[in-house]
Image (cartoon, grey):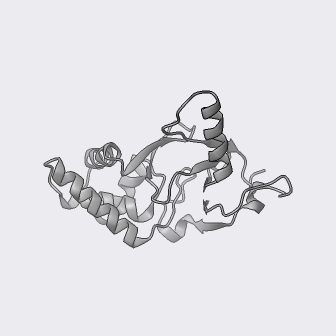
Amino acid sequence: MQTVTVGLNRSATAADSSLYDALPYQVLSAKEYGAAGRRSETVYPMNKTRAAIKIEEFKKVLESRGLKSTQQRHFIAETFFKINTHVSLDELLRKVKRKTPNIGYATVYRTMKLLTETGLAMERQFGDGQTRFENVPQDGHHDHLICIKCAKIVEFQNQKIEDLQNETARKMGFKVVRHKLELYGYCKGCS
């Protein structure tokens, strides 16, 4: 399986032969990042400095709530932040157990619940019945293209789309506080 990360530097236009041609993207093999290679797993690299910053934020959250900063919680959060993955609990548990076999499902669940409650992770549904967790992006909001055949997930940012959504909401007297845009179809390799 291949995974795509996207930073959109220009908008797609009718002149572009496809959205993929309009996007500067990098394809990373799941194997490069130790992924199980499963169809539903997507893996993105994360700057280790950013991961360290997120770990520090998590430690502060635990402290503010009077919770212990255990080695297990730290390792689960570190694993999640370093790979910056749209990952299910089962997938994260498998990754964590590779280095720490004694960590159980309940510990991973509770840690991810804490990360979600505190805004360091987001729960995502991509139409296949599987809940995944996503690292909250530091570079702002992004949207997703999801291939319904191979489950490839492409993250993208497009200011024109954001502006159009805000303009539409404003015209209808609506104040948007958050949104998610998920486009389902076939990637270039599956179409």
Q: Looking at this view, is 146 or 34 the one in front?
A: 146
Depth check: give the residue in front, 74 or 90.
74
Total marks drawn? 0
Which quadrant: the N terminus?
A: bottom right
Q: Is residue 61 left or right of residue 92?
A: left
Is residue 97 visible in this depiction of the protein? no
Query: Would you say 22 lies left or right of 63 here?
Result: right
The correct choice, above or below, for 154 with respect to 130 in the image is: below
Establish if 157 lies above or below 44: above
The residue depicted at 64 percent of the width and 49 percent of the height is: 145
Instruction: State the residue at coordinates (63%, 27%).
Output: 172
Between 81 and 163, the residue placed more toward the observer is: 163
The quarter of the displayed image where residue 117 is located: top left
**Image coordinates for residue 57, horizontal then vertical, percent:** 28, 59
At 30% across and 57% down in the image, what residue appears?
Answer: 76
Q: Position of residue 72 (x, y in %)?
A: 23, 58
- Identify which residue, 119 or 186, lies in the foreground: 119
Report x, y in % for residue 126: 56, 41
The furthest residue to the top: 172
> On the image, which quarter does residue 13 sit in?
bottom right
Task: Say whether residue 124 is left or right of residue 10.
Answer: left
Residue 69 horizontal/vertical position (percent): 18, 57
Q: Is residue 162 visible?
A: yes
